[in-house]
Image (tube, rainbow, N blue to C red):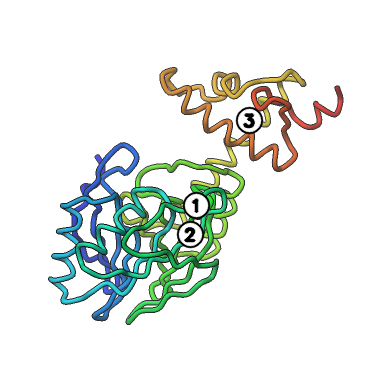
Amino acid sequence: MAEVLPKYLQLSQRVIRILGCNPGPATLQGTNTYLVGTGKRRILIDTGDPDVPEYLDLLKSSLTKHGVDIQEIIVTHWHHDHVGGVDGICRTLGTKYRTSKLMRASTPDLALKETTYNFIQDKHVFTTEGATLRVLYGPGHSEDHIALKLEEDNAVFSGDTILGGSTTIIEDLQQYMKTLNDLLDLQPKVIYPGHGPVIENPVEVIRYYIKHRNDREQQIVQFLSDSRGQGVTAMDIVKGVYKDVPENVYWMAAQNVTLHLQKLQKDKVAVSEDGETWRLVTDSANL
């Protein structure tokens, strides 16, 4: 049974979680947004979906309860359930808050109507009373994804790189694995995820994420090796490797296998001429 998250909760001296009130299959119980700091002006991390009245009322009442205002907004990545609420917050609270994120490379960022983006770089440092947040560029879930380390508590806001109680969607597995190892190097004491409950055993969880992906990659390489140079599809691999997966989710497993194959291609382990059938590079060289 999943932990039911309260819509408002003071998690620590420096961190308040306000649920985005936008539950769904992709957002779980909703997007976690966080007020960070101890002073009269605090940093808001992520903003939920566009114009959710319940969230806007909850955010406003939380600020009033503590007698504080928002200093600025940081967005972990471009997805609508993280950046979508910016305009509504600015309108509701009557301030054009500075909104910082990493710039997308492939396409323009979602346009803001009430304010403008402050585009930042890796290692950027945000400060507010009682809190220092250091940016860690961490692509994989998305090209512009960042995590934020709360220096005072050795805590990490992981965005959608690591979720509480669920796995995440990945765009680029090679980048994602590097990001996981970068987060592991931080040895955080706690992770505040973009969705789901607080992760109290982050090092163990990150190691599990890494081991799970590495084990799956080894299975895929072994399947390619056993195929002896015959081109195989992602679905062939699913049927051969994902023994305990029901057939109605084969297509989801095939998406994961394709991510692994694309990573193996970048690592020069596997190759595909058409993007559909795959073999080991060593097998290709022997043809």
Q: State the residue at coordinates (28%, 39%).
A: 24
Question: What amino acid is labelled 1 in the image?
Answer: Pro
User: What is the secondary structure assignment of the residue under circle 2?
Assistant: strand
Q: Callout 1: few (<14), some (14-19), or many (20+) C-alpha neighbours within 10 Å?
A: few
Residue 146, numbered circle:
2
Q: Image height check: is 51 above or below 72?
A: above
Q: Which residue bears the numbered disc 1?
A: 108
Q: State the residue at coordinates (27%, 78%).
A: 41
Q: Image height check: is 55 above or below 129?
A: above
Q: Which of marks 1 and 3 is nearer the N terminus?
A: 1
Query: Which quadrant does the C terminus fall into?
Result: top right
Q: Position of residue 141 (x, y in %)?
A: 49, 47
Residue 151 found in image quarter: bottom left
Q: Which of marks 2 and 3 is nearer the N terminus?
A: 2
Residue sitting nearer the eye, 94 or 75: 94
Instruction: Tell me if 49 is positioned left or right of 180 in this view.
Output: left
The alpha-carbon separation of the residues under discs 2 and 3 comes to 29 Å
The alpha-carbon separation of the residues under discs 1 and 2 comes to 17 Å
Q: Callout 3: few (<14), some (14-19), or many (20+) C-alpha neighbours within 10 Å?
A: many
Q: Earlier in the sequence, mark 1 or mark 2?
A: 1
The alpha-carbon separation of the residues under discs 1 and 3 comes to 35 Å
Residue sitting nearer the eye, 238 or 275: 275
Q: Position of residue 45 (x, y in %)?
A: 34, 63
Question: What amino acid is labelled 3 in the image?
Answer: Ile
Instruction: Tell me if 7 is positioned left or right of 210 in this view.
Output: left
Q: Position of residue 167 (x, y in %)?
A: 42, 42
Residue sitting nearer the eye, 17 or 78: 78
